[in-house]
Structure formats: C-alpha cells, structure tokens
Amino acid sequence: MNCLICVGAAQRILCDGPWEERDCPDCGRYRVSDDLILALMDQGQIFDIAKTRGWLDTRRVEGAVPSIEVHQALLVS
Ligand SMILES: [Zn+2]
C-alpha cells in the first residue's frame, strides 16, 4: 500500500468509517476521507507534501490521528 501523500511505501491501517488510514514512515499516521481521495483521482491532483506534513504535525498535538477532509486538503496548485 502506498502513502496517499508522498506515494512512498506505507502501512494500511484497517479502520471503520468513510476514510483510509495510513502509517507512513515519512508522513506519520493519518486518515484521508474517501470523498477527498475520489476528488483527487477525479481531478488528477496531488498533495503538497511539505505543507501537508506540517499540517499533520500541528494536528497531532491534539493527540488523535489526524484526518484530512476535502476542505482541509493542501494541494499542489
Ligand atoms: Zn508518506
């Protein structure tokens, strides 16, 4: 399974709910909503890796596994 952010090798974490969870050695553990994955595939867009990692770091301060929703995605423009 590949990381949804950097496309490196990552572990897929099985989870309930409308999202995919990954544990990437570089990006860390996070969830991405199914809606966002579909939107990315539809539009051929990719994450801005550096910005997304930075955003995940700020979210991890709160303790839970961060979850990226459509309106929060930091994409390469
Ligand atoms: Zn990654």
Image (cartoon, rainbow, N blue to C red):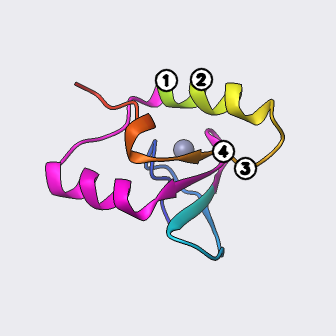
Separation (CA) of disc 1 from disc 4 = 16 Å
Residue pictured at 38% horizontal, 46% vertical: 70
The residue positioned 27% from the left and 51% from the top of the image is: 40
Q: Which residue is mark 1?
A: 50
Q: Is residue 47 magenta?
A: yes
Bounds of the magenta span? 23-49
Amino acid on which disc 3 is placed: Val
> Which residue in the structure is indicated by mark 3?
65
Secondary structure at badge 4 equals loop
Circle 1 SS class: helix
Nearest to the eye among marks 2 and 3: give it: 3
Cα separation between marks 3 and 1: 18 Å
Closer to the chain start, of discs 4 and 2, is 2
Q: Which residue is mark 4?
A: 66
Q: Residues within 10 Å of mark 2 (few under 14, many from 20)?
A: few
- The residue wearing badge 2 is 54
Report the side of 59 relative to 67 (left or right).
Answer: right
